[in-house]
Amino acid sequence: MTVARSAPAKLNLFLHVVGRRDDGLHLLQSLVAFTDIADRITVDTFDGAGLQFLTTGPFATALEGDAASNLVVRAATGLAAVAGRRTDGLRISLVKNLPVASGIGGGSADAAATLQALMAHWSFTPTDGAVHRLALSLGADVPVCLNGHPAIMKGIGERLAPATIPAGLGVLLVNPGAGVSTPSVFRQFARDGGFSEPLTHAPWPADDREAWFARLAACSNDLQAPAVALCPVIADVLAVIGCCADVRLHRMSGSGATCLGLFDNPDAAERARSAVSQAYPGWWCTAGTLHHQ
């Protein structure tokens, strides 16, 4: 049986660093949303031994020898252990449309989509939290990507509460092609000092678009300034998005370097994409729709 799953880009609409555990891992609060801009995972079988992992797509070559490519394999072998299955003769194909290590959870989304596809392929329905624990062991963003719905993410990524997004929003994503190391961004954050005060979780007013945008604008991405200090072109990207017609909000996602712009509808986001692409043809630039549920 061939099973395919989408691996949508994960966007941090805000990201606050609220503390650090004794083991050095940072405690976060983030409103996470997903889009129709995505990688794609396909699972099927072949006649042979071992696990076969194939990559195609515009960013496939960036995975060669990179740990992000192994995240799919680690997800498959980890789930096989949980489900009591074998990976011999299993083929996993990844269409890599999202830039690697760019703050939009590409590797985490791929791992989550692998777990989803394999659970369907093996007709495996977990009865406890083993798959959630496996997801967290693969990376802080994997549980929220496995959940696949807008969420307030807390802790190190293991605590998720449902969130709502206004329907029909358009999103613009722009990446200048500059690499940013997540550990380096957190080290820069530590040098800058200061944690955000934890927010009290309450339902976001998705039925009141203006109130929703106002609440989001009052938040921030605490990693944005440290990332800009390490990679100044991010500030240029933010300035360009901020000048786009009809943009409602713009900020960096995750630890960068991808930046996002939110619009009232996908058509406005597409017009912005066209303008930015023409002005900066060397940047990765795409537009789509923000999932509201």
Image (tube, helix red, strand yellow):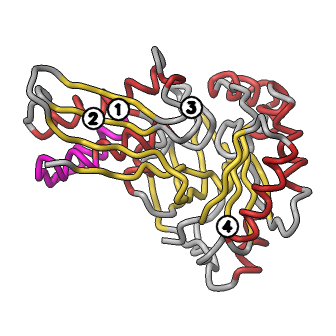
Q: CA distance from mark 4 to mark 1?
A: 29 Å
Residue 171: which numbered mark, if any?
A: none
Residue 92: which numbered mark, if any?
A: 2
Chief SS of the magenta region? helix
Check if residue 130 falls in the magenta segment: yes
Q: Which residue is mark 3?
A: 100
Magenta-colored span: 116-137
* Sequence-first tag of 3 and 1: 1
Q: Which residue is mark 4?
A: 170
* Sequence-first tag of 1 and 2: 1
* Sequence-first tag of 2 and 4: 2
Given the image, on which type of amino acid does mark 3 rest?
Val
Circle 3/circle 4 CB separation < 8 Å: no
User: How far across and how far down the image is residue 218, in percent?
Assistant: 80, 63
Q: Nearer the viewer, residue 63 or 281?
A: 281
Given the image, on which type of amino acid does mark 2 rest?
Ile
Q: Residue at x 37, y 51 (%)?
A: 146
Q: CA distance from mark 2 to mark 3?
A: 18 Å
When asked about the image quadrant of residue 45, the answer is top left
The local secondary structure at tag 3 comes to loop
Would residue 43 appear left or right of 283 to someone viewing this image?
Answer: left
Circle 2/circle 4 CB separation < 8 Å: no
State whether residue 208 is above or below residue 214.
below
Residue 72: which numbered mark, if any?
A: 1
The local secondary structure at tag 2 comes to strand
